[in-house]
Image (cartoon, helix red, strand yellow):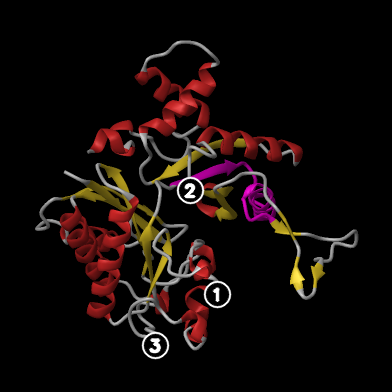
Amino acid sequence: MKIIECVPNFSEGKKEEIFHILKDSLNKVRECKLLNIEPDADYNRVVVTLAGSENGIIEGALAVSKAAAENIDMRTHKGEHPRIGAIDVVPFVPVKNATMEDCIKISEVYAESIAEKLEVPVYLYENSAKYPARKNLSDIRKGEYEGLEEKLKDPNWKPDFGPAIFNPKLGAIVTGARFFLIAYNVNLKNEDVRYSKEIGEILRESGRPKRDAAGKIVKVNGETVREPGRLKCVKGMGVSLEKYKITQVSMNLTNYHVTPIHVAFEEVKKEANKLGIEVSGSEIVGLVPLEALILAGNFYADGKNYDEKSLVDLAIEKLGLNELNPFHKNEKIIDYMI
């Protein structure tokens, strides 16, 4: 059987009753399993992880999306994380016996169906994108929910599915097929978000605007000149976690074969050290492939021969994955869940 993962991100991270409703919406869906539900109050979003067959994952994604639509209202939403709607992003990922093409077709079926059921604009991104300008999630999200009404008036931003009409309660949805993404945050023992933002800009692939000696942004023919970032397949930004009195370099690792977790962690440490700031640990939001932790374990093993369990434990220790919340291997590693 083909196994596809779906990782919907919804714009609600505080209301426990809504998390129960999302879970319950999947009870009657066949061939679809809820692997993980991970809310974050500071980001005010919840990451849900599902896995299932081709039909099962479509039914599951639609069921949980409709439950979210009934219970989340963007008109009152505030949070640290960028977002464009209540059902912010719904990616489909090939896990076993499935191809990227399979997931592209699944995302299109989901997009057409959810747009019709909810009368909401839907954009395709990553490998499903029909236009180069829509491949990158951050480009679609630009202006966020607050700028969406004006954005929909621009013919260049006509949705791939659904009406080009602002839905004030739900905003818009982004969906598509992509490689396994690791949502990875590195913790800085400092409350000034300027530093985490600076590190995120230095490391992320898109880099940052180039500045002259006076600190002014350099432009050529009206276009901002950018300094490329250090790490490929990395998106990054700085956020504040007031509850813990820390900030985070919040990253999406879009291909951990290109930039593994341990490389991102060590590069953040390097930049933080230049600023005199301590890195205290890190966290993985949602699930992670076993291979990604094995790669980190082997890096920290420094040539020593360890078994799988020891490599995973070593990665967890060296990356400080238990700092904010316990990292339960059997609940966080997707290979152990399926």
**Element marked by disc 2:** loop
Three-letter residue code for mark 3: Ile
Q: Classify 255 as above or below 194.
A: above
Read off the residue under disc 3: 165
User: Nearer the viewer's eye, disc 1 or disc 2?
Assistant: 2
Read off the residue under disc 1: 143
Tell me residue 155's x, y (percent).
49, 86
User: Nearer the viewer's eye, disc 3 or disc 1?
Assistant: 3
The reply to whether discs 2 and 3 touch (Cβ–Cβ < 8 Å) is no
For marks 2 and 3, the one nearer the N-term is 3
User: In the rendered structure, does residue 195 fall within the stretch colored magenta?
Assistant: yes
Tell me residue 276's x, y (percent).
74, 38
For marks 3 and 1, the one nearer the N-term is 1
Q: Looking at this view, is 230 or 68 the one in front? A: 230
Q: Over which residues does the magenta segment extend?
A: 182-207
Spatial CA span between label 3 and label 1? 16 Å
Q: Looking at this view, is 172 or 226 the one in front? A: 226
Three-letter residue code for mark 1: Gly
Q: Quadrant of the N terminus?
A: top left
Q: Quadrant of residue 307?
A: top left
Three-letter residue code for mark 2: Thr
**Element marked by disc 1:** loop
Q: Residue visible at 49% across and 61% down?
A: 81
